[in-house]
Image (cartoon, rainbow, N blue to C red):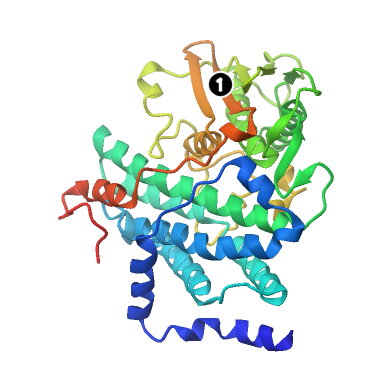
Amino acid sequence: MAKNDNTSENFNLRFKSESDFDSKIKQFSKDMIHPLSIRDIYSFSEKKLEIEQAKFLWKELPIRFTRSYIELQNLPFGLSESVAVKSVSSWYKNILLALFSFPEPKTEALEKSYANMLASLLLEHAQVPHALGLGIKELKTNHRLSLVEQHRIDQILNSFFLMRISLRFLVEQYISSKQNRNGFRGLIQTQCSPVLVAQNAAHDVAHLCNRHLQYFPDIQVYGSKNDVFTAIPTHLYHILTELLKNSCRATILHHKLTSNIGSGVSPPIKVIVAGGREDITIKVMDEGGGIKRSDLQHVWSYMFSSTPKPELSLKEPFPFDHISQFKEGECGHSFSLWGHGIGLPLIRLYARYFGGSLKLRPMEGYGTDAYVHLHRLKSSSKELFPDNLGKTIQQMGFDGRMCTGKIPW
């Protein structure tokens, strides 16, 4: 065991030059991603298959991280040159160095070492959304972009964040599958009750809202706790938490509530859970004034925010990845009521990741209804990915730089 540990400490010494690293990037950029369904992942996540899981990730993670690294290196409008994005690129390069250098985990000892390395990487690089949010803020400050240009940036960031969701999920699923939690296999719960998840999210958001604004609207959850399906409750919690934060902020600001107004004065926020044969649908209703039609085309953009935000820096702690199993139990008391305006587009990606959807139906002057649709059937829920890396790189070149649609070596 000691011999393997000593070997793992010297893995990164195998890379003698930047050219070695670049050749690895070129190699893995040509490999295809292997999308998985919830059924595939659930069946594969048995404790007795730990070495097989590790061997699959050993092959798959470098492919997915390589795609994300290339995207970070080629963001348009100078976004790749911002301090925040350069930090993220550096983090991803360090991750890739570790992944490229690790030997195939064919033995029990190497598998354990590999799991420890992945857990460490997951914790060390949890600020990626926060850092990219700062980069986007800097871009908005320094450039006046047209709607078409903003749309191009949104497409690129959707590709990056969707890949990041998949990476974190696969790693957390693998590490969590080592634990014996009743009703779970890794992060996947076979009897997940969306009503219970909604109640937990409502409780946590009410606490958060009260802490920041000294008031919180009543959040009412309707539906049967016994209506269950196979799902990833941390993803659903993240989606509902963001929607409820938006609804609480809008309701309080729209009704000009203050700390001396008692509970029950504001209209309640309602969460309705309905289970069909194929889908679970969750409706979040508020009377927070709705959204202007002129703003509706922007709400899914990373370049848009309708709420004031405090000034943050890359050096400040920002527990954006509150859905992580490694921070379970803290999520209701650690995340912020304010963000960078990237919350809505991010949670739509969480809904889409396994084939679901998120839609808004606002009524200006009254309120907004948000609809979350999630597949009930395990076989229907398969990972969603952008088309291909070449198309994404071509999209990145539309800021006027020379671009052939090929990976830039």
- Quarter of the C terminus within the rendering: bottom left
SS of the residue under disc 1: strand
- Residue 344: image x %, image y %? 50, 34
Which amino acid is tagged 1? Ala
Q: Note whether residue 192 is visible.
A: yes
In the rendered structure, the answer to whether residue 186 lies left or right of residue 35 reads: right
- Residue 153: image x %, image y %? 32, 43
Q: Quadrant of residue 84?
A: bottom left
The answer to whether residue 68 is above or below residue 228 is: below
At a point 36% along the width and 68% down the height, the residue shown is 27
At a point 65% along the width and 35% down the height, the residue shown is 236
The answer to whether residue 116 is above or below residue 6 is: above
Q: State the residue position of label 1.
A: 370
Q: Nearer the viewer, residue 1 or 39?
A: 39
- Residue 265: image x %, image y %? 72, 14
Q: Note whether residue 312 is visible.
A: no
At a point 55% along the width and 46% down the height, the residue shown is 36
Q: Quadrant of residue 90?
A: bottom left
